[in-house]
Structures are given as C-alpha cells and as structure tokens.
Image (cartoon, rainbow, N blue to C red):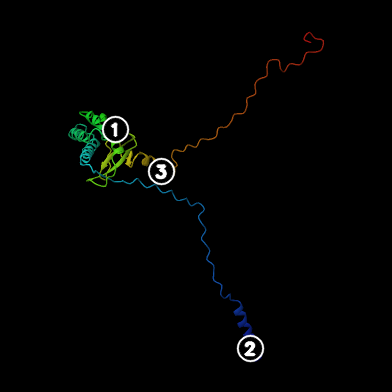
Amino acid sequence: MNLMRTAAALALLFGAGCGEDEGVDPVAQDAPEEANAAPAPAPEPEPLMRRPIHCCSDLVLENALKSYLSMGTTLAKGDAAAIEADRAALQEQLGQLGEDHALAEMVAVVTEMEACELDACRESFITLSSKLVETIGDTHSGDLDIAVAWSRKHSAPWIQEGNELHSPYGDGIESYSWGNRDEVKGADKVREAERGEGVVNTPPIEEAPPVEADPPDGADAPPPAEGSDGA
C-alpha cells in the first residue's frame, strides 16, 4: 500500500510539471492599423524671410536712399502731395552723384514727379525702385538696414527699411512679400504645387462613332432585266 501511494504521488508531481511551458513568454500582438486613416497634410512652405542689405559706403547715396524710403512710406499712406519735400531732396542728391553714376538717369524721373497725382507718382516710383534694386548692393557699412520686397499685383519691387512691410503701390498684404521677383515667383510655384493649385484635370475626349452616309438614290433598286430598254 505504501508503494502504491508513493507511485501515485510521483505520478501527480510528474504530470503537473509537464503541463507547464517553462521559458515561453507571451507575444504581444501589434494593434491593427486603421485602414481609413487620412494621410498627413503636406507642410506649408516657409515664408520668405527678410534679407537685410546694409548701405551705404557713399554718404550722398545713403542720404538719397533716406529720401527715397521716406517717399515710399508716404505713398503707402496714399498721400502724393506730402512727398514733395523728399522728392526735391532726392532730385538734388541724385544730381550730386554725377553724370557717370548708374542712377544719373533717375534724376529726370524724379523731376517729373513734381506735383504728380497719386497713380502717376506710384508709376514713377516703380521705375525708380526697379533701378535702385539693380544698383544698390550690400556694402556692409552705413546706417541703413534695408531689404527688397516684391508686389505681385504691380509686378514691381521696392526697397524698405524696418521689419513691417507696407507697399508704396497701394496693394493689400496678400499681394506682396519680402524678396526679389525670382524669389517670390519661385516660392509661389512651390506653394501652388503643394496645394495642387493650377492643375486642371481635363477628361479625355471620346471620339464619336462614324456616321454612315445615306446611299445614293437608286442604289437599292434591282438591276434591269435582260432585253429591257435599260440593257
């Protein structure tokens, strides 16, 4: 009896040990991905940053630019009459640069701005600004901290001091940006491409089935009998 009880106890212990899976860790299941998850929207391109130009090594040119900047601020407010003092000063300062200077031809443009109406003043200011943008370089000296801006509406640049843009041409904030023509147009193309703007999906043109022409008169008539007058 003792031997039978011992054998039964050993059998129970052996069976309990075999029923356990030792050393096997449970495997965590990955959560299923959402099938209808929308893709992340494309990031908006960074706005064009102000690129400062330090000017000028020539004191006469620096004073001329100060007069120009003051005129631009006044035109941005829509006041043409108030530019006269700065216009007269700019005319004299440009003349002091000499006939050989790149800006010498702008003396005539500034002279014609005397007593001009607002629209005419702004048109002349576009001509003056375009020439200044071509001429002014970063001299790393002088008191002026200026930058170039571009008006999309008027397709024209201007130079401005300070960090807050105000177009001298009277257009709204959605029309202008820091940067020159190529920079602004390039950034606009990137923005349009990322938004999918300007892409027209034209459906394919389906060709119409050919139209069968009506048979000529008499085409379906039976042939004449032999020996008839029509033979």
Residue depth check, mark 3 versus mark 2: number of the one nearer the observer = 3
Quarter of the image for residue 60 reads top left
Label 2: element kind: helix
Count of labels shown?
3
| Residue 69, horizontal then vertical, whole percent | 23, 39
Q: Are marks 3 and 2 in contact (CB under 8 Å)?
A: no
Q: Which x, y percent locates residue 39? A: 47, 50
Percent x, y of residue 189: 41, 41
Marks 1 and 2 in Cβ contact (< 8 Å): no
Identify the mark nearer the N-term, 1 or 2. 2
155 or 194, which lies in front? 155
Q: Quadrant of the C terminus?
A: top right
Q: CA distance from mark 1 to mark 2?
A: 113 Å
Considering the numbered disc 3 on the image, is that residue within a helix, a strand or a loop? helix
Mark 1 lies on a secondary structure that is: helix
Q: Going by the image, does 177 lie left or right of 29?
A: left
Query: In whole angstroms, how far apart are the C-alphas of marks 3 and 2?
Result: 86 Å
Q: Amino acid at mark 1?
A: Thr
| Residue corresponding to mark 1 | 127
Q: State the residue in front, 174 or 146.
A: 146
Residue type of the residue flagged with mark 2: Thr
Q: Nearer the viewer, mark 1 or mark 2?
A: 1
Residue nearest the observer in this picture, 162 or 25 = 162
Q: Is residue 141 left or right of residue 27?
A: left
Which residue is the site of mark 2? 6
- What is the x, y in percent for residue 95? 21, 33
Q: Amino acid at mark 3?
A: Arg
Q: Residue at x 30, y 41 (%)?
A: 148
Which quarter shows the N terminus? Answer: bottom right
Question: What residue is drawn where x is 66% and y is 88%?
Answer: 4
Q: Which mark is residue 191?
A: 3
